[in-house]
Amino acid sequence: MHGYELRKRLNTSLGVFRAFSYGTLYPCLKTLVIQGWLIEETAADSDPPAAPLAGRRAKIVYRLTAAGKEHFEELLAHSGPDAWEDEHFAARFAFFGQTSKDVRMRVLEGRRSRLEERLEKMRASLARTRERLDDYTLELQRHGMESVEREVRWLNELIETERTGRVERPSAEHEHDNNQENGGRPGDRGTA
Amino acid sequence: MHGYELRKRLNTSLGVFRAFSYGTLYPCLKTLVIQGWLIEETAADSDPPAAPLAGRRAKIVYRLTAAGKEHFEELLAHSGPDAWEDEHFAARFAFFGQTSKDVRMRVLEGRRSRLEERLEKMRASLARTRERLDDYTLELQRHGMESVEREVRWLNELIETERTGRVERPSAEHEHDNNQENGGRPGDRGTA
DNA sequence: TTCGTCATGTAATGGGTTACATGATTAC
DNA sequence: GTAATCATGTAACCCATTACATGACGAA
């Protein structure tokens, strides 16, 4: 798709991502083209649904190259040391539909243990400072800890679901292809 | 206190804030000095608990000036247009102990309505895109929304507590002074 | 004697935003 | 005719991080 559309999607569809500004997005797309992961298709038009002639500024439609797709899949699979941090994790999770089960398990479990570490620290510091802080600060910490605990529970559910190989919510039950090497069970598109 | 100590506190005590690096902290303190909100006290030492002579590198202890305190209180009270965003709110909340009840109410209610706006948007976009996304993306959105809903409930509790003028948790019940113009009810220090 | 922690600081870099420029098209 | 939205892009800036430099002290 083209830049503008991409940004809108990031804005609305995925609530978790903050939308990047154009000042970030367009230069970024350009570098991806230079690196060979994307190609620009200065698509005059391909399917005009009730075409009102040319129109507007020429859209630049970006498409993944073969190399780009390969690289992307590599990125999803190979989890670096900070793959468990908030934003990294959310990004990975958003593309779970394109990964295999074992990758998903690794990421989910990694995230969980990361959060458990964090909980440890929070509990420790809370115990240490308990008496020396005012009620509001304490309340803030308490709420923060509960948020983390809640995410751990969420992860537990997801891991369990993943393990038993089941769809987690009612949701749509259409059929679709694409998805490498995992018999297309849990994460397939719900697209018609 | 001095820079190093300040940073440690931000690291451990307040779990919510990410700790700033020294590269941020020290220059920042310097500018605050220049602006007149802080003064450096190249404190040789004031209370050596079992003083082992001079020792180490000279600590630079920072202290609020009168102007600084005034400025700070102004910042807490006068909420700008983005005072309801995540980090701004957390920062404000952390200093609730130093504010008056009506400021607290304004901030809490502002935050809540901000979150409710956000919920609206999320609900709308979720309804719009429901069928076009895979289960994982949907699950991510769902979890995000529930997080926001949870924070709204939290705020409701806090507002209610604030309104009826009560301490929200068991906590310590010591007495202390300092706190301007609000009869020292809910947010006072729990310090011994 | 070496390592960890205390303590302060600087320079290079990174990753993002804001504000602006451009211009056509659609909706009121 | 005027505003909002579509659509792409650039330049200036901001805020924070990383990596480094310096050095003394205490503990293993």
Image (cartoon, coloured by chain):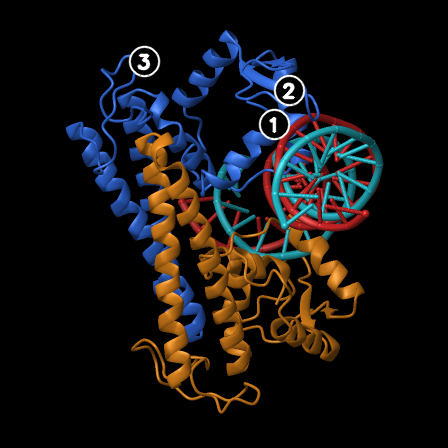
Chain colours: A blue, B orange, C cyan, D red
Q: State the mark number for residue B36.
A: none
How packed mark 2 is, by other alpha carbons closer than 10 Å (few <14, some 14-19, many 20 or more), is some
Q: Where residue A118 appears, x then y in whole percent? A: 37, 48
Residue C11 percent coordinates (x, y): 78, 37
The disc label shown at residue A60, or none: 2
The reply to whether the C-beta atoms of the residues labelled 1 and 2 are less than 8 Å apart is: yes
In the displayed structure image, the side of residue A118 where residue A46 appears, left or right: right
Could you say which is closer to the camera, residue C5 or residue B128? Answer: B128
Q: Which of pointers 3 and 2 indicates the residue nearer the eye?
A: 2
Q: Is residue A101 above or below residue B17?
A: above
Badge 1: residue crowd in 10 Å (few <14, some 14–19, many ≥20)? some
Amino acid beneath label 1: Gly
Identity of the residue drawn at 32% across and 57% down: A146
Q: Is residue A88 above or below residue A64?
A: below
Give the alpha-carbon distance from disc 3 to disc 2, as whole Å: 29 Å
- Choose between A33 and A71: the one closer to the eye: A33
Q: Which residue is mark 1?
A: A3
Q: Amino acid at mark 3?
A: Gln
Q: Which residue is mark 3?
A: A180
